[in-house]
Amino acid sequence: MFNEVKILASHGRQYIKNLHTQSVSNLFRGRPVISKNITADEIIAVSELCPVKAIDSKSGSIDTGRCVFCKECSFMLPQKIVFTNDYRIAANSREALIISPGVENPVRLDEIKIRKEIRKLFKGALKLREVSAGGDNSCEMELAATGNVNFDFGRFGIEFVASPRHADGIVITGPVSENMAEALEITYKAIPSPKIIILAGTDAISGGIFDGSPALDRRFIEQNHIDLYVPGNPVHPLTYINGVMDLLGIK
Amino acid sequence: MSQKSYSEIKNNSFSLDLKEIPVLKYDLFCEQVSDSLKNEAKHCVAYYGVPISGILKFYCYIADDNNKIIDVFSHEQNIHKPVLKSLTTVCPQFQIFEREIHENFGVEFIGHPWLKPVRYSHDRSDKSKMIENYPFYTIESEELHEVGVGPVHAGIIEPGHFRFICNGEKVLHLEIQLGYQHRGIEKLFIEKKDSLQRCILSESIAGDTSIGHALAHSQLIESLAGIEVCETLQIERCIALEMERLAVHIGDTAALCGDVAYQLGQVVCEALRTLIINTTQLWCGNRFGKGLVRPGGSNYPLGNEIIDEILRILDNTGNRFNEIADRIYSLPSVLSRFDEIGILTKQQGLAIGIVGQSARASGISRDLRKTHPFQYYKQYSFEPVILENGDVLARGMQRNLEIRESMRIIRELTEIWCEKTQDVEKPVYDYKLKPESFAISMVEGWRGEICHLATTDKNGMINHYKVKDPSMHNWMGLALAVRNQEISDFPICNKSFNLSYCGHDL
């Protein structure tokens, strides 16, 4: 007993008090800001450099749903492209993930597009089933971390559950492998309606580096309405947490 | 023997001319390989087929731990579904490799007891085999029942299917069926001509081992392109690798505690892991070290500021980890759950060719940092931690001791780092690879032996790329360890191995 108390004392308080404003390392690769002065030639150069074609070769916008956050474009043009440590980059429409040159506004959810029943039914408690469909286990570990002593997302009644029957929605990681497509469909069908779909990580949103691989089957993602896109490679726990809180309207 | 029947290569040193590798008749190949593997200090690193213009070329790599050499054996067959005698019958460690060759090219291995699909890869030879129809082993009996788990599991983990055959609560047999995570990675390594794309790909093989796999890939490219990196960078890479090991081992300790309901152990270790991965994030902006390791150089050379922070965190977490670990491994309620549960004996481990920390917990001295050193481990004298019992307690204890060892290594490496004056170069992406060459790159990741192999064509383009995650060997270890255990002990057995699904399925 004495041992445990001693350990608790050196453990101290670990939880993050304010999940909206917690600061992370300056080097963290979050929301990109592209200078409005970027030239057409520079845009072409970085769009050719980009390993996942996340940079539009005409407009120079960066699609954070495709971006693997390798920061190579910023290393090439440090004056023109900066990855800020702003981790609040989740959005509820695919277009909102695309960040154009000169845009420095934070990424926020479009309130009008949030389905009415989501806040009405899930604001008090949201139980989710996670399905890894070809994920590389980094997004999975970050989602698991949202429930740990540091992030303690459970304080809002939001957590992952074992059975889809107990869940209000599904969180998908990975580019959706062909071999996992059916299991994903079955899991989704087992969740009672109304239910939400969250895509966590670049792989889930666009296929990421695996986009175009014949071993994928992304029909589920294409055919269903997605309620929340959480970019990242892997998603940072704070990106996911803030995205879900914004979706539910938790201040 | 008048003529040498195999080629020798050192880990991560130089590339080999493909034509230099002697091609053996299959019978002689079997004889040589099985003779060679009678030596406990040797094991099969990889064995695979490469189809080249109508011929199926086979390459087999046997690591010789005593001489720090890898022997390369080869044989050739007609590509049209050859029928061969199975090596698995004499060397069980070939089981997974022969299964993989069978799945990819339709080669029949006569006498293989278990010639089942490995991962239902997209380019498998028999497309009529589907993942939903996996041929599970069954036993006809009135008393026995089967328990099927997965592919979607209760926790936030990757998909895989476990089929238990139980007598009451006791597991008689476990069959592990994987493949759900298959993304076609090896094909993508050939198709993606851009070097940066291949780096990103290597970091996505298994995200929990981003640094390990990225390092294996970078070393491979450096061997094929003839790039040498300075000692400063080599030290930084070793520090990164040890940080990854630390983070995962501490996380695994948390998970093991969680599974036996010792909540204090779980939450303290979770918080300690957070501190370590946040330090990696401070270094390179990513908690898993994605972007940290690149061929030829680094975008994130270490600086004094980061070194100081690493040392500060090590002091902080080191003391706190020792405090909780001493408690965990002296608590009767924890020990009674870990002790003599899920035993993998040394004999079993040797037979199936187990690697990494699971091997070391079963008394098998396999650690590439010593046996086939790479990066700065070549200059650094290192003794692996070896335990004997091979049970959950040993694998937990193994982590406990390796955590302390990694902390010590990082501290020493930072001291050596301070004496080095070379500047770390920027990464090299426009490299040119030697034509018609072959190279092997092995890294001791936290799980064990990671191996990347590639060959180039006459234009120096990669025409074959092979990835072997340690899980490839070790999943069979888990299946053996749970035999005759209570099914309720499966979770802690599974956690104690903590194998990769995506690294296996590729």
Image (cartoon, coloured by chain):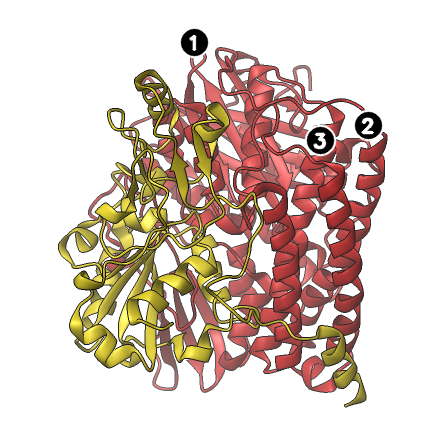
Chain colours: A yellow, B red
> Circle 2 — which element?
loop
Callout 2: few (<14), some (14-19), or many (20+) C-alpha neighbours within 10 Å?
A: some
Quadrant showing the C terminus of chain B: top left
Q: Looking at the image, is mark 1 or mark 2 earlier in the sequence?
A: 2
Residues at circles 3 and 1 in contact by the CB criterion of under 8 Å = no
Specify the amino acid type for callout 2. Answer: Lys
Q: Quadrant of the N terminus of chain B?
A: top right
Q: Chain of mark 3?
A: B
Residue A250 position in % (x across, y down): 35, 73
Is A195 positioned to the left or the right of B226 in the image? left
Which chain does tag 2 point to? B
Earlier along the polypeptide chain: callout 3 or callout 1? 3
Secondary structure type for disc 1 = loop
Q: Nearer the viewer, residue B494 or B27?
A: B494
Identity, as a three-letter code, of the amino acid under mark 1: Lys
Residue marked by disc 2: B420
* In this view, B122 is above or below B11: below
Q: Which residue is mark 1?
A: B458
Res. B480 image quadrant = bottom right
From mark 2 to mark 3, how far is it between C-alphas? 11 Å
User: Nearer the observer, disc 3 or disc 1?
Assistant: 3
Instruction: Give coordinates of residue A148: x percent, y percent.
Output: 53, 71
Numbered mark located on residue B29 in the image: none
